[in-house]
Image: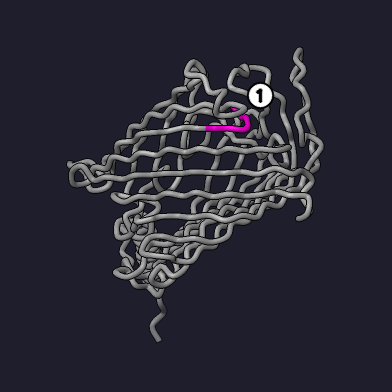
Amino acid sequence: MRELGEGYWLRVWLGVGLVIITSYESLAQNVVERLYNRFFNDTTSSANPHISFYPTISYTPETSVEVGVSALYLYHARNDVKQNRLSEIQAFSFVTLRGQYGLNMEHTIFGDRDRWYFLGRERIQRFPLLYYGIGSTTKPHNPATIDAFTIQLRERAMRRIAPNFFGGIELDYQRLSLIEFEQPDGFMHDIPLGAQGTANFGLGAGLVYDSRRNALNARKGLFAELSYLNYGWSRGSDLSFSNVTADVRLFRTTRPGQVLAWQAYGVMTSGSVPFNQMALLGSEIIMRGYYPGRYRDKLYMATQLEYRWLPFPFSKRFGAAVFASVGTVAPAARDIQLGNLLPAGGAGVRYLLFKKKDVFLRADVGFTREGMGFYILTGEAF
């Protein structure tokens, strides 16, 4: 038998190596292509449910480095796009280098042919709160830091009464415990009601009119909610108080791909209200740029206007928005003063994340007299 030389084996190993490299490149290309299609090309049918996960990272002086994971689930009841609206469930979990952690969830769920409508928010977290005091004239410096364990479960379960009109019950449970109230150097805040910890359960009723087809990106329609919650000792609450909330949002398509959106929002509380359940000014939704709870009192009123390009006429994916808002807090309606109105405004960019479900990723910057706030979230602010 002829002896095989070194040249023969060299050619064999080169051939095997070429096959391995080609297979690896093909596999890598396939993985990259699938990831691209999942996050940028949106090749799934518009009728099929869609779930996505995203890593997050941020930094604030109160938390140090924060890492987390966000999840988004989109679907139509019975996968019927024509008859049923888009429902969404969002979840976000995080942990910080200082041992803080949390799980936040929000959902807007429509049943088959709008027979049922569920709106809710759940939060379980160990996270610091900045407390500036109560009222519209508190100073932006020297906040107290309140490190606490928080549970918030807010749910609205509603039945359709008429087309786009729903009514039902509202539940809210909030617990604040394991509190560490840290005063700033050189300044002492009055200890607010509830600073030692409270647990309160609210029960009430609500009415909602909602003609939007897509709650994450409404291009036309009206949303209006009026709700009442009562927190009483008879239901095991530590304090006795009540809460009335009104939220109105109007959307108009002015040109193809362009939307004018307006919102008016108000909260009125009465009774022995703990500081963490007062009406809070500032959020990622309205009065963007202000820290959530930068101003707090028994009454809060705000309005905002936003213009959106979804997307730009010259782009298939990228868009933008500009917005302006004004609001204030007060002990009661008779105490509102025009001189205490607080302005805010800003702009943001948009990226069409899920084309077939018309859902954008937004990055907004809100500016105020005291500074700015930066937000990256899925879906429009309101």
What residue is pinned by disc 1? 132
Q: Is residue 248 above or below residue 187?
A: below
Does residue 130 appear in the picture of this structure? yes
Residue under the image location 30 percent in, 56 percent down: 355
> What main secondary structure does the magenta stretch of the protein show?
strand
Q: Tag 1, which secondary structure?
A: loop
Confirm whether the magenta stretch covers residue 299.
yes
Q: Give the residue furthest to the top.
A: 186
Vertical comparison of 92 with 14: above or below = above
Is residue 304 located in the magenta-colored stretch of the structure?
no
Q: Residue 127: horizontal and vertical position, in percent?
A: 69, 40
Q: Is residue 258 above or below residue 208?
A: above
Residue 21 visible within the image = no
Quarter location, residue 213: bottom left
Q: Nearer the viewer, residue 144 or 202?
A: 202
| Residue segment shown in magenta | 295-300
In the rendered image, residue 221, in percent from the top left (x then y), is placed at 31, 51
What percent of the width, then of the height, locates residue 144? 72, 25
On screen, residue 143 versus residue 54, left or right, reads right
**What colouring does the structure picture have?**
one colour
In this image, 23 relative to 372: left or right? left
Q: Residue at x 35, y 53 (%)?
A: 359
Residue 68, relative to residue 298: is it above or below? below
